[in-house]
Amino acid sequence: MDASYDPQAVESRWYRVWEEAGVFRPEVNPEGEPFSIVIPPPNVTGVLHIGHALNMSIQDVIIRRKRMQGFAALWLPGTDHAGIATQNVVERELAKEGLSRHDLGRERFIEQVWAWKAKHGNRINEQVRRLGFSTDWSRERFTFDEGLSKAVGHVFVELYKQDLIYRGERIINWCPRCHTALSEIEVEHEEEIGELTHIRYDYTDGTGSVVVATTRPETMLGDTAVAVHPEDERYKDAIGTTVTLPLIGREVPIVADDGVELEFGTGAVKVTPAHDPLDFEIAQRHGLPAVKVIDTEANITRAGGEFFGQDRFEAREAVRHELNKQGYMVKIEDHHHSVGHCSRCGTVVEPMLSLQWFVKVGPLVGPSIALIEDGGARYVPKRWENNYFRWMENLRDWCISRQLWWGHRIPAWYCDDCDEVMVTIDEPQGCKSCQGSNLTQDQDVLDTWFSSQLWPFSTMGWPEETADLAEFYPTDVLVTAYDIIYFWVARMIMMGVHFTDGEPFRDIVIHGLVRAADGRKMSKSIGNAVDPFDVADEYGADALRLALLQAASPGHDIPLNVEWIDAARRFGNKLWNAVRFALNHVESGSVPGEGGYPTEPGAIDRWILARLGEVTVEYDKLLEEYRFSDAVGLLYNFAWSEVFDWYLEMAKTSLRKPESAEATRQTLGVVIRDLLALFHPVIPFVTEELWSELVGDGLVAATSWPSPPQQAAPAGMDELQALVVSIRRFRAEHELSPKKELAVLVDDPNDITSGWWRDQLEVLANTTADFDGPPAEVAGHTRITSGSLQAFIPLAGVVDIEAERPRLEKAIAEAEDLLGRSRAKLDNPNFTERAPADVVAGEERKVEEFSAKLDKLRTQLSELG
């Protein structure tokens, strides 16, 4: 075995072994109960970021443990065809050659995209392997493969037949640069300081005016009403009258609508139905026309009068200028607001009335809410259910058409002769209405989320009745970040309930986002993004996984500190050295892969076996509850603080004694073995390497989950540990060398010490111990209390009492002075009432620290006699 742990060497050799052994396939446990997870499919164009590393680390812990517990565990991998992202990547490649997609035409362009995927699309899979994630590659899927495409077509046609998909004009997010509608998740909202323009609209009868405010004054060219709240006393007489639209001269009504906020601004709002979703809804309720004044290029249309042809931002300034010139401008003020940008190109998104395909979500919402309310599926943590309910209850119809070429083309055909619309999976041979043959397929493709919403069951072969669908659906767990609950999780639930009559997954485990150490969002532009593969190259994939999982508290963001990863790397070293220590006493390959617990363990062996049993039970409980940070923290602390720091040290004494050596060798082997197995789902590479050295037989990835027998721990272990720690602290306080042997007198009224206990005390604390009770004269001794025990260390010959007394007196005076200053600050109302809360809390902590220090110093002084 190598003397030192080299993560790169270890991590380069095991994934191929696991794959070749077939341990990632559910068939490895043919009699096992089915258990399944589908991976949230990353975009085929992308690379795994630190958020993927967290998400997949959590899934890998779940699936590796279930596999080791004997389940037929399936973790199904795959990627998303990522319509707009992939198309943009390939278009940029073409642009380097001076070409556009239109130069190639639709068919050749799609061929070009498939060629790009064939060349670059495997990068994600190699990264999944690099981080050790144990997916079943024999079942890998792609949202644009033949089977999933069939499922997409089937769902579209069925929803259309059920009147749940329709084509109509509604407000959508439009990117003027990408020339497509965008889903909400493709819009990134950024807080900006804009300008709020207040405009006077005069009543048509000349009796007065109303003031409205907007951050987009160019849209006023398309206003078709002014809306006020029906209970607003300021406008009760104005409702039903009209105002004249400045610059355009159009007469528009004042309508009463509950959607207007009574307390906001002047209480009157301009209504631009073609360019604002709320205004569109007001228009629908009142039968108002929609005037489109911004086109798909983000230029002003002919309906904008003299501003026709101007870019929207150019028009914004021109409209302001003209309003001011004609006397309609009231004021302009700074205004903080959120502005949507296309996530792919950064262009400001334009809300726009557009003819698109939509899913009618109303009938789908109720059953999807009921599923969660009735316990058919649950969110972990439960608090995310309320977010889900709120979003579902306010859901608007979903725009699913995209003006792209790469994606699932909408299966709708239009008859050029009679305008008949036919929606069918297979291309119709003729018009069903007029029997004409001049048919044109819809040019648009479906939103990427339309296919990914079917992922849990389409990947299993649905709508065919496949063996995998019968065995592994519904899936058991979905693991995802909270930022896509609405865009993906909710839609999967809607489709699962609607098409499979039940939940697509039973547990929805929500984790937070990985942020920079200061809590800010990671961003390449800021320069604070952490590349998981740079980290893996420097510290190892296992260290990255361990650091992330230690911080993975359900639903909470993780402010990732690279120091955590370095600490995780050091833990790998510690585990490596523990196995090296074990192999000095246990023959390599002699530890059984399962069982092998000693039948007659010694006292220290019973203690560590008892703790192993307790920790395993609690670890299992925490993992079942998806409390990953608590679970990993528990096992980490047990390994470091109890196995490494205590048991390995105590074992050295036991191994030197012929009567106890064999039981300790057995115990040492099985405890380290079980520790490797318990840690394997978290840090798979190093545990597999160490398993091969210690056990030698088989793979830890394919072994059974540990189930150590319950043991009764010997009495006195807590007292021993506390006493050893206190004696070591005494040495540190008095600057005594660990090599200096100390005499200790032990008073054991309850007779909990025995031969093993005394041996360990003398070795661990470097003492000669006398167990005949307390000294006749306590003065001149340091007293240490440990449970029912008391121990006394004679100071004579150990501490220079004559030098120690003035040192302690000086230290006491200094501590009293510092304590007095802090108390004086806290007694001063000017300080406690005016100082920041954290400053006051800091002073309170100082009082506690100085008080404890004073107590300790005074005790030490009194012990000098």
Image (tube, rainbow, N blue to C red):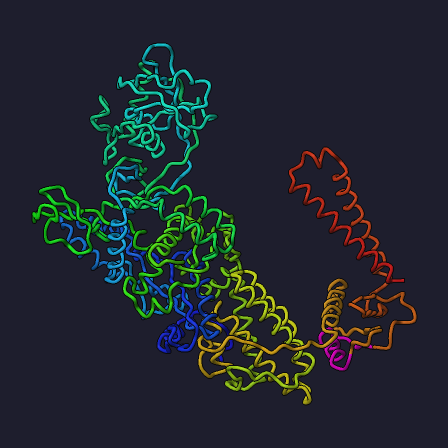
Q: Nearer the viewer, residue 144 or 188?
A: 144
Residue at 38 percent across and 14 percent down: it is: 209
Is residue 762 visible in the rendered image? The answer is: yes
Extreme right residue here?
Answer: 776
Residue 649: quadrant of the picture: bottom right
Q: Residue 320: x and y, percent?
A: 32, 21
Residue at 55 percent across and 74 percent down: it is: 675
Residue at 53 percent across and 72 percent down: it is: 678
Extreme bottom residue here?
Answer: 658
Quarter of the C terminus within the rendering: bottom right
Please state if 415 lies on the left or on the right of 56 as rendered: left
Q: Residue 542: x and y, percent?
A: 47, 66
- Say above or below: 106 vs 325: below
Please tell me whether residue 285 belongs to the stretch shown in magenta: no
Residue stretch in magenta: 754-770
Q: Nearer the viewer, residue 650 or 71?
A: 71
- Say above or below: 640 vs 489: below
Please tell me whether residue 763 belongs to the stretch shown in magenta: yes
Please state if 514 lies on the left or on the right of 173 as rendered: right
Q: How many marks?
A: 0
Q: Nearer the viewer, residue 550 or 303?
A: 303
Q: Residue 339: x and y, percent?
A: 38, 36
Please state if 133 lies on the left or on the right of 409 as rendered: right
Q: Overall secondary structure of the magenta stretch?
A: helix
Q: Residue 618: x and y, percent?
A: 59, 67
- Say above or below: 14 vs 166: below
